Image (spheres, rainbow, N blue to C red):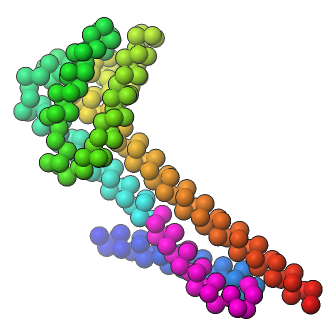
Amino acid sequence: MITIIVLAALTAAAGVGLGILFNKYVINDFPEAERKTGKVKTIVVFLLLFIVIFAALYGKVIADASVKSFSAQIEQDIKKNYSNLDIVKNGIDVATAGKDPAKLNSTVNDLTRIIKPGEWGVPNFIWNTVLGYARKELQKVIIRFNEAGGENSPFVNEKNYLTVSSFINGIQVTALKIIKNVVIVIISVCVILLAVYILSSLSKASKERKRAGNK
């Protein structure tokens, strides 16, 4: 906890520090009437964007750890409490699943009914998003397997069987991918907003320098 506070403080300090430097070398060239407001705005923009980026990265670390812990727990729970399921006892041969998709769908439905995300603190909308991706990926696995005769997917093991372990691993990989993409989007938006602010400020400062030089 102390480490996170220190890192957050350092991130905030970096944002404020860069804001101060930007004020010194850019905002000081703003028209006098806009200079004070511009300096305050710069500090706020740099500080907020740096904090958001830090929060996104820290959130990813926490979310990744939670997903991995959640995955391990539900795998143990399924194996312990639902040992009668075919996927737990024997697994499902993906090579034959394409010929009997109803069996695979039934198995996946059984698993998703068993896993109750609310019991583990996972919001339903997040689970439904992950599950939607997982179903699509499983369908791709079957199609590609039937076409090429083999498949390298986190949803199947080295013997091309869908097992509880491989299914949970596929769910985990899918969830981690979604988290990563969300973080990338957040950071990209922050970088774009910062770039737009910097460029617009540089343009305004440049115009003011030219105007002052022409006097």
Point out residue 157 in the picture as x, y percentages from the top left corner.
Answer: 31, 23
Q: Is residue 51 left or right of residue 30?
A: left
Q: Quadrant of the N terminus?
A: bottom left
Name the residue located 87 percent from the left edge and 81 percent from the top edge: 210
Name the residue located 49 percent from the left edge and 73 percent from the top edge: 48
Boundaries of the magenta span:
30-53
Prevailing secondary structure class for the magenta stretch in the rendered image: helix
Front residue of 68 and 183: 183
Point out residue 115 in the picture as x, y percentages from the top left corner.
Answer: 17, 38
Q: Which image quadrant for residue 3?
A: bottom left
Name the residue located 33 percent from the left edge and 29 percent from the top edge: 135
In the image, residue 137 sits, relative to residue 35, either above or below, namely above
Point out residue 143 in the picture as x, y percentages from the top left corner.
Answer: 41, 16
Q: Quadrant of the C terminus?
A: bottom right
Q: Which image quadrant for residue 39?
A: bottom right
Q: Is residue 154 magenta?
A: no
Q: Which image quadrant for residue 208?
A: bottom right
